[in-house]
Amino acid sequence: MLHCAVCDDDQVVIAALQSMMIEYPAELDCAAFFDPLDLLEEIRNGRKFDLYILDIVMPQMTGIDLAREIRKTDSDCGIIFLTTSDEFHSDAFDVEALQYLNKPADKTALYHAIDRALRYLGNQKEEVLPLQTKNGIYALVIDRIVYVESYKHTLCFHLKDGSKIDTLDSSLALKKLLETLRFPPFCTPYRGFIVNLNYVDCLSKLQFSMTTGALIPIPQKQFSKVRRQYSDYLLTRYAKGEI
């Protein structure tokens, strides 16, 4: 899940952004702030966000100054600016902003900016998931996961090399794991399963065929939703030139 903070003193702008972000194909946790000082206080109290979408012209503190404060403790997060003026471009580059969007932001421009942020954040480092196994704590690189299966209070991670890793009983719940493995590329076609769409060989009637040969069932009532998710995922990769 991508944790975002949106800061703008205009409630109409905040509402519009939140509405568009709800429809974004990846899961976003979006926190809204109408005062930059409130957001800064949250950050100083230890709250961390992956992505900040900041208005530039605000009372109390400009978005540029807020971004400078953010950069003092977080050099890895993504920052996107929203404004009606073009005069702050050079300042935006000084704080390593990913994008500069003119207000009012339309859905296409916003989604492209979030896509770019996801690529940027994904390239920061390999994401690792710590797992408690009977042999100790295992640091699993998330990109190796083909699918995850829940069985009798344990999770079985099926990996791209054909190997498997089982967690200790009740050490990690599937619901908690879903908060870490975001869509795309992960989705839940069936209760008890999480699938990495990067390793889907074929979507046929009521099942995923994985590159490892595994077959993951899809209930009929879930099939339309899963098919739409997989189609959106493929179209996004095609638009990026990845397939």
Image: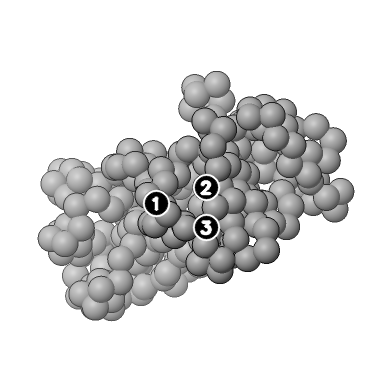
Q: Nearer the viewer, residue 85 or 236?
A: 236
Residue at image mark 2 = 165
Side (left or right) of 72 relative to 234: left
Residue type pointed to by label 2: Ile
Q: Nearer the viewer, residue 40 or 148?
A: 148
Residue at image mark 1 = 138
Q: Earlier in the sequence, mark 3 or mark 1?
A: 1
User: Does the residue at mark 2 contact the one at mark 1 (Cβ under 8 Å)?
Assistant: yes
Mark-to-mark CA distance, 3 and 1: 9 Å
User: Which image quadrant is residue 158 in?
Assistant: top right
Can residue 27 be seen here? The reply is: no
- Residue beneath the point at 73% across and 45% down: 226
Residue at image mark 3 = 167
Can residue 67 be seen here? The reply is: yes
Residue type pointed to by label 1: Tyr
User: Does the residue at mark 2 contact the one at mark 3 (Cβ under 8 Å)?
Assistant: yes
User: Which image quadrant is residue 147 in?
Assistant: top right
- Residue beneath the point at 56% across and 66% down: 169
- How dense is the environment of label 2, judged by Cα within 10 Å: few (below 14), some, or many (20 and up)? some
Q: Position of residue 144 (x, y in %)?
A: 48, 38
Q: Nearer the viewer, residue 10 or 33?
A: 33
Q: Nearer the viewer, residue 46 or 130?
A: 130
Residue type pointed to by label 3: Thr
Q: Secondary structure at mark 3?
A: loop
Side (left or right) of 144 relative to 121: right
Q: How is the image coloured?
A: one colour
Q: Position of residue 157 (x, y in %)?
A: 56, 47
Q: Position of residue 18 (x, y in %)?
A: 51, 63
User: Does the residue at mark 3 contact the one at mark 1 (Cβ under 8 Å)?
Assistant: no
Q: Secondary structure at mark 2?
A: strand
Mark-to-mark CA distance, 2 and 3: 7 Å
